[in-house]
């Protein structure tokens, strides 16, 4: 016979946890995804593709391979590129051969440092042509459009702040002349 304490403990362990699971996808949903939220979630349960964010603009495919291959065999890496300049813009997709390897990567690589930056990983329903390009107005990532702090690893100032800085420099040059 099962005691009341055992039942209470089993309920507690299934309901509450101090440490969150590291292999769970975030609540993010790509706004350009054509299917329903249910379809998105269903695709994530089978996906072997990870979105990797917060990369330095200078991180190479070889560096990504070196770190991410520790979690499993990599099928391919697709570097995120600025739509305008066709240069890296701080994200990539990593495709593994199995869903389990992708989950292992989320557990063991997410939150670690690569090129002095803490990388973020999240399950992705799968790479489709065109998604390798940034969606920001300047061609890079949207988050870099509005960034106000200087970040050398992500190309300096955010796009809007960079315009402000350039405008101020041009005005200072005119005053100096």
Image: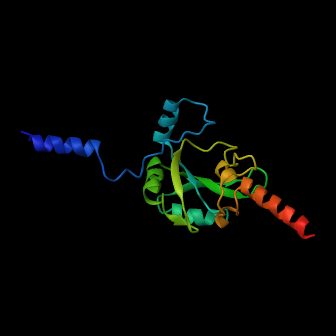
**Label tally:** 0
User: How far from the left and from the top, in percent, is residue 76?
Assistant: 60, 54
> Front-most of 172 and 60?
172
- Point 65% across, 55% down: residue: 147
- Point 62% across, 65% down: residue: 62
Rendered-image quadrant of the C terminus: bottom right
Tell me: residue 24, above or below residue 108.
above
Q: Is residue 132 left or right of residue 39?
A: right
> Front-most of 29 and 109?
29
> Front-most of 67 and 12?
12
- Point 52% across, 53% down: residue: 121
- Point 68% across, 56% down: residue: 89
User: How far from the left and from the top, in percent, is residue 132?
Assistant: 67, 49
Q: Is residue 64 left or right of residue 41?
A: right
Rendered-image quadrant of the N terminus: top left
Tell me: residue 143, above or below residue 157.
above
User: How far from the left and from the top, in percent, is residue 129?
Assistant: 68, 43
User: How far from the left and from the top, in percent, is residue 163?
Assistant: 78, 56
| Furthest residue toward right | 177
Here the colouring is rainbow
Tell me: residue 172, above or below residue 16.
below
| Furthest residue toward front | 175
């Amino acid at each position: 016979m099962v005691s009341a304490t055992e039942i209470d403990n089993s309920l507690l362990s299934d309901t509450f946890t101090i440490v969150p699971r590291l292999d769970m996808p975030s609540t993010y949903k790509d706004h350009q995804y054509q299917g329903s939220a249910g379809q998105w979630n269903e695709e994530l349960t089978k996906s072997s593709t990870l979105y990797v964010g917060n990369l330095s603009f200078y991180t190479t495919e070889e560096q990504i391979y070196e770190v991410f291959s520790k979690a499993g065999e990599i099928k391919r890496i697709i570097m995120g590129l600025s739509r305008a300049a066709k240069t890296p813009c701080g994200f990539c997709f990593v495709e593994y051969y199995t869903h389990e390897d992708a989950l292992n990567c989320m557990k063991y690589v997410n939150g670690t440092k690569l090129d002095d930056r803490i990388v973020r990983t999240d399950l992705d329903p799968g790479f489709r042509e065109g998604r390798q390009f940034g969606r920001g107005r300047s061609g890079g990532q949207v988050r870099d459009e509005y960034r106000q702090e200087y970040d050398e690893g992500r190309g300096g100032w955010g796009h809007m702040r960079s315009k402000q800085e350039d405008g101020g420099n041009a005005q200072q040059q005119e005053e100096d002349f």
